Every structure is written in C-alpha cells, then in structure tokens.
C-alpha cells in the first residue's frame, strides 16, 4: 500500500480548492521540494530541488506551496494505517505513507477485489488516495504498486495473480526501478545486459552471488517469487534517537544555540521515556553551513558518557550542555545543532552505578508527572528554564497549514 | 491528572464493597465519536443552518465513513468550497437544503461538481446560543 503524493493529499483533504491545482510541500525550514502533486510533477518540479531555485516556476504556474506540517501528516498517517489494519491480521508500517499488509491465511480468493475495497475504504474514510500492489514477495508487491500507478491508474490496484501478469510487470520494470537497487547496481546490471527486472530474474545465481553478494541473491529470490525479506510487524525500538534541526537563520550567540540544544535534548529524553528506554551516552554536534563556502567553517561533535543509564530530561540536558561547552567556539555563524542519545537499554534493565548520586525513584516521578501535565495541558507547558521561550532558532515555516486534527483552535472553519 | 482507582491499597479495615463493581468512567469521545479514524471536528460560521441548531461557532462532528442518506446534514464541497446543508435526494435528483428560509435550495446538477465530504453525526453547541436558533 502506498499513499499517493501523501503530504500533498493531506493538504487537499482540508482544502478542496487544491484539487487539480499543482501542490508542492517543502522540507523543514522551507528548504527543498519533498512532495509534489501529479500536476506539479508534470510542471517539472524535481524532488529535492531547493525552493529558491523554483520560485519563478512556482509563481508562474500558481503552484500552492506548503511548509511541511508533520503534526497533520502524522495524524493522517495514523488514520490510514489503522484503517489498513482493520482489514488484515498483520501489517508492517514501512514509512509514514507505505505499509505491507500480510494477505496470507485470509479467506478471500479474489485479492483484486480485496485490494479495491481497501483502497475505496481508505479514500472514503480519510480522503487519502492510495495505490495497491499485490504479489508473492515484498519486492514484487512494491513493483506491482509502481506498475499499478503507471499502467492501472484508474483502478489503482494491480495484482500479479499469475505467471503471465507477473512476467508482464517484470518486463515493464527497468532494473533501476527495482526496490533496493541503487544507482551503482543499476549501472552495473545494465552494463552486463540486464535492462529489465525480467532480464535480471534470468541471471545465473552464481554470477549474482559473486558480483552482488547475498543482497543481490536475496533480491533475485524475491523477484522469482521466493520470499527472502522478513516481516517486521512491530516497529522495532530505536537503537539511537536523534533530534536536530537547522536553525531558521544562522546563529552566532552561544545562549541562542544552547537554548536550541536544550530543546533537542529534552525532545530526546521524552522519546526515550515514550519507548521505555534509557541511554548512557549523549552525542552533541554543531556545525556552520558547509554550502556557504565564503564563510569560516566549523563543525564539531562530542560524546558525553553518563554515570548510569537515564531518560531523565535534566540529566540529559546537563550532559548536552557539558558537551556543548567544550565544543562551542565563538566567531562562527552556526546553521545546525543536534543531540543523539545512544547505547539504549530497556528501562527495566538499568543498573545503578555506585557513583550514581541521583535519587532515581524521585526523579522518575518528577518526569512522569511532567509528562502527564504536558499531555493534558499542552505540549511543553512544564519545561526546564534552559529550554527558554524565545526560540530564535525556530524553523522557517512560512506556508504552514493548520493542525486541523490535533488542535481544537486550528480546526477547519467553514462559512455556511 | 489521571489517578487510577486500582492503585488504592487498603491497609486495614473492611474492603470497599465497590471494588468488584468498578467500571470505567464515561468517556465522551466514545459517546460522540463512533468511528475515530474517519471522524473530524469542524467549526461553522454563518447562519444558513440556524434552524438545524447550528448557530455560528457550533462545532460539528463529521464522519467521512458514513454514506449520506436523504435527510442527513452533510458537509459538501461545491466547486471547491465547503458548505453544510441538509441533503435531500430521490432516485433521480438531489438537493442541498439550507436550514434557514432566507436562503435558497440548491438543486444539484451533474455539471456542478458537488461532492459529499462527510456526514454530520453530532452538533456541539453552547446553550447560550440556543436562543439564536429559535428565532
């Protein structure tokens, strides 16, 4: 399952005037185009193009431009995924707008009809258009999805139900468009005379293993209909958590950067508590803008090890500031800073260190109370003073839509 | 702050006779929203649905998963604009009917490009605004 131009589709649900009009969504800080409606693609807006380079094009064609509204997209994604989940016993959420549904052991024989029903339901219930690809392995399902987008646009569903249909799809797909084949392998395969996915399925196993390692072998099996990529039904708990942002404008003052850093540290600590893990290393980084070649450049990172594992906001902020004090240097214009928490262990397995002076149970009570207050009264109502209020580093988001589904003050307003 | 009943430990004395009869407190979300995944909250301005008890600032609970029937209050999109009206339909024709005699009924023709966005399943209003609806 793949949502069509997901971010653009989310904007359209609450703004039907955008139907038929080209829509572009920009990355954090309004940097690059990261989502394009069909119409915008046709205008030649390329994925990842910096916004300033296409300003004229966008204005000329009356393109609707949006800053990315991840609060909205996250909620819409949750609605879509849970709607998928109501049809099948198991699914794997692959990204914010893609999921693999396990259709094994289902009582249906006509999977095309099932796919059509799921698609219609999601479209009706959430307003988000999706495309469905059904096949025997994940790689083939991905390909079927792409094939549906290209060749079965009106139905939005393709089922590689038999040998002939699978072959037709494999012939249509260039090697470079196979899931997991990057630019290097794509060039390599073409040089050796494999142009389509169908060509690749006829490659000798031995040759693939020698030249493309086990990864290539796995792909080959998948294309031949033998599942080789496992399922991940529960989202794996993260091994590291990173929070970083580019500043809305370049910053020079230490206090301003430290404020941003403390907010990133606090965000990391909250994420740790949400997934019930602790970290014992805090990695801090700061850097200038490497693209401004005429300016003095500076980039440093540092690891701060903690006496014992924690997910306490104050301890993680403290460690981040400690590291920051060491790596900060005055006289540069900084673009970005970030915090990565590492060496994560489950909360239940934290071993107390003999050097640990903190009152663990008291601290965790403080944290859970803070989280509860923030959850019921609003994000960051209770926070640490170092997190500040000014937010000079705040992201640029000049074209942000409302948080229609998560903030009662920003719901859709209709003149009737 | 949420405090769970179950954490209450009775150290001594007679155990609470209510212990075996605990039920979860009424959750208005469940009462007002049958299908959370397809339900959205919107707010209205304007008086075209005043006799349907939708005064300005009313909040509407709108379910996209419900198929609109004759007589439902619907959120419709007409040529890209949202509106809220009664839906009237028979086998051949379909109308959007305002809840205010000041406004005209709209007969929907195929070239009008009208779509039903969702069906209003609950109306949330402030009792202070009820009087406005009764004039």
Image (tube, rainbow, N blue to C red):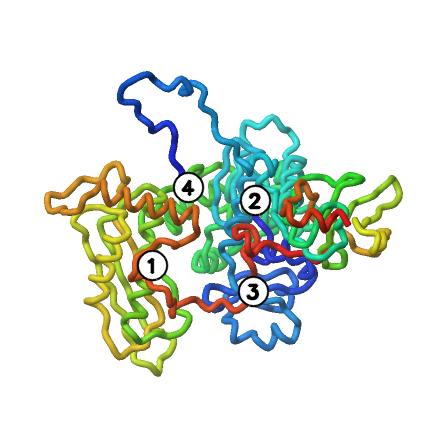
Secondary structure of the residue carrying tag 1 is helix
Task: Report the residue marked by disc 4.
Answer: A235
The 10 Å Cα crowd at callout 2, few under 14, some 14 to 19, many 20 or more, is many
Q: Are marks 4 and 2 on the same chain?
A: yes
Residue A140 point in image, percent of width and height: 54, 43
Residue corresponding to mark 2 = A80
* Residue at point 86%, 51% (across, down): B107
> Would residue A48 appear left or right of B14 to someone viewing this image?
right
Whether callout 1 and callout 3 share a subunit is answered: yes
Residue position marked by numbered label 1 in the rendering? A264
Q: Is the residue at mark 3 from the same chain as the one at mark 2?
A: yes
Q: Are marks 1 and 4 in contact (CB under 8 Å)?
A: no
- Front of the two marks 4 and 2: 2
Question: From the viewer's perspective, is A95 left or right of B111?
Answer: left
Q: Nearer the viewer, residue A146 or A73?
A: A73
Mark 4: secondary structure: loop
Q: Measure the C-alpha gap from mark 2 to mark 1.
A: 29 Å
* Viewport quadrant of the C terminus of chain A: bottom right
Q: Residue A66 has which mark? A: 3
Q: Chain of mark 4?
A: A
Q: For the point 29% across and 66% down, which residue is it?
A: A258
Labels 1, 3: front one: 1
Q: Earlier in the sequence, mark 1 or mark 4?
A: 4
Image x and y of residue A359, in percent? 18, 44
| Tag nearer the camera, 4 or 3 | 3
The count of marks equals 4
- Disc 1 to disc 3, how far (Cα)? 24 Å
User: Which tag, 4 or 3, sits closer to the chain's start?
Assistant: 3
């Amino acid at each position: 399952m793949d949502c069509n131009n997901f971010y653009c589709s989310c904007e359209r649900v609450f703004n039907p005037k955008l139907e038929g009009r080209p829509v572009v969504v920009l990355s954090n800080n309004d940097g690059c185009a990261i989502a394009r409606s069909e119409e915008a693609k046709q205008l030649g807006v390329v994925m990842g193009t910096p916004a300033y380079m296409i300003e004229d094009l966008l204005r000329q064609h009356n393109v609707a431009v949006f800053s990315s509204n991840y609060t909205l997209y996250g909620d819409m994604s949750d609605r879509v995924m849970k709607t998928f989940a109501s049809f099948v016993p198991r699914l794997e959420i692959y990204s914010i707008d893609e999921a693999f549904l396990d259709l094994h052991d289902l009582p249906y024989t006509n999977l095309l009809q099932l796919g059509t029903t799921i698609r219609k339901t999601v479209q009706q219930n959430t307003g988000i258009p999706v495309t469905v690809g059904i096949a025997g392995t994940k790689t083939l399902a991905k390909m079927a999805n792409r094939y549906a987008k290209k060749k079965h646009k009106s139905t939005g569903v393709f089922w590689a139900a038999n040998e002939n249909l699978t072959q037709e799809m494999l012939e249509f797909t260039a090697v470079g468009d196979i899931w997991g084949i990057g630019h290097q392998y794509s060039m390599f395969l073409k040089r050796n005379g494999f142009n389509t996915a169908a060509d690749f399925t006829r490659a000798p196993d031995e040759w693939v293993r020698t030249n493309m390692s086990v990864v290539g072998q796995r792909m080959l099996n998948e294309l031949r209909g033998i599942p080789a990529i496992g399922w991940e039904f529960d989202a794996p708990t993260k091994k590291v958590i990173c929070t970083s942002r580019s500043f809305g404008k370049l910053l020079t003052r230490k206090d301003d950067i430290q404020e941003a850093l403390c907010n990133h540290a606090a965000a990391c600590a909250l994420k740790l508590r949400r997934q019930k893990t602790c970290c014992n290393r805090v990695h801090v980084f700061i850097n200038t803008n490497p693209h401004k070649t005429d300016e003095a450049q500076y980039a440093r990172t540092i690891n701060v090890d903690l006496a014992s594992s924690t997910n306490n906001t104050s301890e993680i902020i403290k460690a981040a500031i400690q590291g920051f004090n060491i790596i900060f240097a005055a006289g540069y214009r900084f673009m970005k800073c970030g915090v990565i928490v590492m060496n994560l262990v489950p909360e239940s397995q934290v071993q107390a260190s003999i050097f640990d002076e903190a009152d663990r149970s008291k601290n965790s009570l403080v944290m859970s109370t803070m989280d509860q207050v923030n959850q019921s009264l609003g994000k960051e109502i209770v926070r640490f003073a170092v997190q500040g209020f000014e937010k000079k580093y705040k992201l640029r988001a000049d074209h942000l839509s409302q948080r229609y589904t998560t903030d009662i003050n920003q719901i859709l307003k209709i003149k009737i | 702050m949420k405090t769970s009943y179950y954490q209450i430990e009775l150290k001594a004395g007679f155990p609470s006779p209510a212990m075996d009869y605990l039920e979860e407190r009424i959750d208005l979300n469940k009462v007002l929203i049958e299908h959370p995944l397809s339900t959205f909250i919107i707010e209205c301005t304007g008086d075209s649905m005043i006799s349907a008890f939708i005064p300005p600032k009313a909040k509407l609970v709108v379910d996209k998963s419900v198929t609109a029937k004759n007589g439902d209050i619907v959120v419709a999109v007409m040529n890209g604009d949202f509106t809220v009206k009664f839906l009237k339909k028979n086998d051949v024709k379909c109308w959007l009917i305002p809840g205010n005699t000041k406004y005209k009924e709209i007969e929907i023709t195929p070239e009008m490009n009208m779509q039903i966005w969702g069906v209003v399943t609950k109306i949330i209003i402030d009792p202070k605004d009820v009087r406005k609806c009764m004039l």
